Image (cartoon, grey):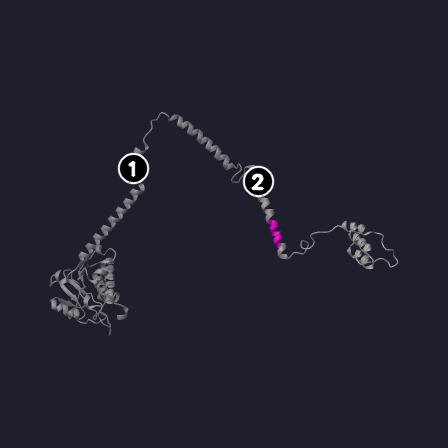
Amino acid sequence: FGSRGSAHCIHAIVMADSVGVADAASLCDEGPPLDAEPSAMSDDDAQSVVDEVPVEHGTDDADAPKSKKELKRARAEQKRLEWKEKQRAKRKRQRSSGTGGTSGGGWRWRQFDANAKQNEAEGATASSTCTDIPAVDASSTGAAAAQLHPSAEVADKEAKREARASKKAAELADFKDRCAAGTTVVIDLEWENSMSEKELKSLVQQLLFCYSANRGAAHPVRLVFSGVAADSFTGQKLRKMSGFETWPLEVLEGPYIDGFSKEQLVYLTADAEDVLEGFAKDKVYIIGGIVDHNRLKGVTMAKAEDQGIATAQLPISQHVDMGAYSRVLTVNHVLQIVLERQASSNWRQVFEKCIPGRKK
């Protein structure tokens, strides 16, 4: 305070509580008059006055103005607390009145208690009336019932299984009858040594197409695979197919010449001079199982001549203009022509449907 006005400033501080800070500061700045006598207040009295001055706490951070974000968060928290309090009071009223809720004596629990008491009373009455009935061995009666009356679920599954098996057998029998009514087609698979592994894989794929087409045809043929030795590449690939052993077709491990008479055999080859007019039921038509991309020209014709069997070509050039394209077709395309010809007598429609568009 300085040497002159210590007592005067202490008095100004005391007056700040009543007259305001600005007035007290002005008094402190003015100081005592120059002709005034020094205060007679001792240092101990001055200290006691200072101790009596009230001190305000918490005015540094708490009274600082808050941001809009903090005010918004505070209002949201206040609303949340108010909502929770209302919900708590609502649940309390419901429990006390018994008009809802999952606990606290609601009507559901009172109804449950009433039903339980009624059932208990009825059970006691029933047990009292049945005390004279002799006990029965549950295990023996259960075993007898299981033997005499199988479960409905097991019986239903068994009936469905038998129905499926019966339907499948009937369809297979019908397919074999339709095959017997058609002509016989042999796919000659005795050319394995003349093809590469890639060509053999392509041939196996064409054989699968042949079987699929014949299986779904309205007028199927009696399909025969000849020359399928057990150790051959084609035979191994075919036998890896799921269910191949049960396919409705004939598989000959030996050559076709040993399975049919020469008078029945007709080798279908584009090099033949005779043109085929139709497929006879008493004939066996041979399709060469070859994938060579025109490498092995004339080999099927030469084989037929060596074996002394008849040859014929399909009447493609008489009904379709193939231009400069080769008349050699894939195995599955030739079989498709035979199947379609059995269903239709129009060669042109058959070729339009079976010959690939790239060759027309």
Does residue 360 show up? Answer: no
Q: Locate the N terminus and report the quarter of the image it occupies.
A: bottom right
Say the numbered circle drawn on residue 92.
2
Residue at (28% x, 70% y) in the render: 358
Left or right, residue 8 beside residue 105: right
x%, y% of residue 167?
25, 49
Q: Based on the displayed image, in which of its 4 quarters is residue 326 positioned?
A: bottom left
x%, y% of residue 8?
82, 55
Tell whether position 187 is magenta: no
x%, y% of residue 336?
23, 63
Element assignment for label 1: helix
User: Which residues, given as a range, are shown in magenta?
Assistant: 72-79
The tag earlier along the polypeptide, 1 or 2, is 2
x%, y% of residue 98?
54, 37
- Do labels 1 and 2 touch, CB within 8 Å? no
Say the numbered circle drawn on residue 146.
1
User: What is the C-alpha distance between the residues marked 1 and 2?
Assistant: 56 Å
